[in-house]
Image (cartoon, rainbow, N blue to C red):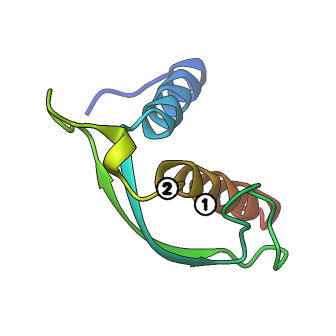
Amino acid sequence: MTHLTADEELARDAARWRALMSMPRIRMQGSAGVDPKTGERTLGTHVHFGAEFWTDMGPDYDRSKDPQNQLEWGLHALTAMADALIDLGR
């Protein structure tokens, strides 16, 4: 295993986060502790959600046929979860 410098680890972590936030589709199954429209945490550091994630949807994918707000809701939930974990010192 290659050991990374602290700067390399930070760059890798940032690249991973940007990759997650650029995924083409999230199908949300439900959430608690996050407003699906604004991303505001509603229960302090308690955030819970269920979702399916896709890395590629293929050339025929039409986002307009997805249930409304699914991707935005999913990105809000991921961000709220990460922020809650940071606030908890994890």
Identified at 54% across, 21% down, the residue is 11
In the image, residue 74 sits, relative to residue 60, either above or below, namely: below
Q: For residue 7, which numbered disc appears in the image?
A: none
Q: Earlier in the sequence, mark 2 or mark 1?
A: 2
State the residue at coordinates (73%, 67%): 35
Could you tell me which secondary element the residue under label 1 belongs to?
A: helix
Q: Which residue is mark 1?
A: 77
**In this rendering, would 11 be left or right of 46?**
left
From the top left corner, tell me how far across and down residue 45 is, in percent: 78, 73
Q: Residue 53: x percent and y percent?
A: 33, 54
Q: Residue at x 30, y 27 (%)?
A: 2
Q: Is residue 88 left or right of residue 18?
A: right
Q: In the rendered view, tell whether residue 44 sits above or below residue 41.
A: below
Q: Which residue is mark 2?
A: 68
Can you give x and y, in whole percent of width and height, for residue 54 in the image?
27, 48
Which image quadrant is residue 41 in?
A: bottom right
In the rendered image, which quarter is residue 20 located in?
A: top left
Mark 2–mark 1 CB contact (< 8 Å): no
> Which amino acid, by three-letter code, is at mark 2?
Gln
The CA distance from mark 2 to mark 1 is 15 Å
Q: Choose between 25 and 82: the one closer to the eye.
A: 25
Secondary structure at numbered mark 2:
loop
Along the line of sight, the residue nearer the viewer: 73 or 89: 73
Q: Looking at the rendering, which quadrant does residue 36 occupy?
A: bottom right
In this rendering, the count of numbered labels is 2
- Please name which of the two marks, 2 or 1, marks the residue nearer to the observer: 2
